[in-house]
Amino acid sequence: MDYLEIKQNFEHHGFSTQLFSTKEEACCYLVDILQNQTIGFGGSETLKEMGLFEALQQKNVVTWHNRIPGLAVRKLANCSDVYITSANAVTETGEILNIDGTGNRVAMTAFGPQSCYYVVGKNKITPNLSEAYQRCKNVAAPLNARRLGAKTPCAVKGDKCYDCNSPDRICRIISMIERVPMEMKCEIIFVDQELGF
Ligand code: SF4
């Protein structure tokens, strides 16, 4: 399915959409439209690769636990008017899947901010819900577990999910956004590059 069809499917589900060729263009777009805002970030390699925190900090108050770790910072980020995150997987048919350990991201993408922006590299796009779930569990979660230094079998072996019961298990809550939550504006910013996990 091409981007035109994928965008149409998300728009049919209530999302606005954008498409950029590069992460630099996507970063400039967000810098242009977001000023004098309180902005929370979800944990994300995509946002890190974009340099988005540094770019938006110039004219906004941005809170991100990837910069200052801890539950207090997560809570502060979840009081923001704007939330920016990526996704563990999206479907060509217009749904978004995310897995969390603490639930801060799935909470804010479901309820809280006035507006939510998802930055999605082409590697996150899957044909359907089944493959999106498989991507979350067997691609995104093991790579994130390894990044976080979690003592889980997926982090050690790096190949797939072992449905572990480790204290470090990062897969504790999974969300599927089927339609834009009521009273929230959501935008999907597609970037035609591989970004994040
Ligand atoms: S359930 Fe455990 S093994 Fe599976 S991806 Fe999550 S942390 Fe890794």
Image (spheres, rainbow, N blue to C red):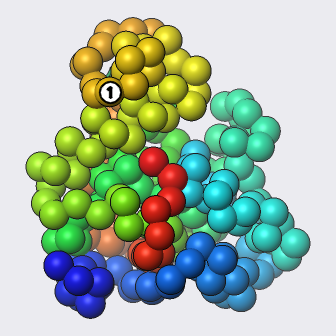
In the rendered view, would you say 129 is above or below 151? below
CB at mark 1 closer than 8 A to ligand 1?
A: no
- Give the labeled residue for mark 1: 159
Which part of the image, by quadrant, shows the N terminus? bottom left
Ligand 1's image quarter is: top left
Q: Could you say where residue 92 lies in the image, as x and y percent from the top left?
A: 20, 71
- The residue nearer to you, when weighing 166 against 23, is 23
From the viewer's perspective, tell me whether residue 20 is left or right of residue 25.
left
From the viewer's perspective, tell me whether residue 130 is left or right of residue 163.
left
Residue 12 visible to an observer of this rendering: no
- The residue nearer to you, when weighing 158 against 174, is 158
Residue at image coords 56%, 57%:
46
In the rendered view, would you say 162 is above or below 178? above
Residue at image coords 29%, 63%:
125
Q: Could you say where residue 175 lies in the image, as x and y percent from the top left?
A: 30, 47
- The residue nearer to you, when weighing 96 against 5, is 5
Q: Could you say where residue 161 lies in the image, as x and y percent from the top left?
A: 28, 25
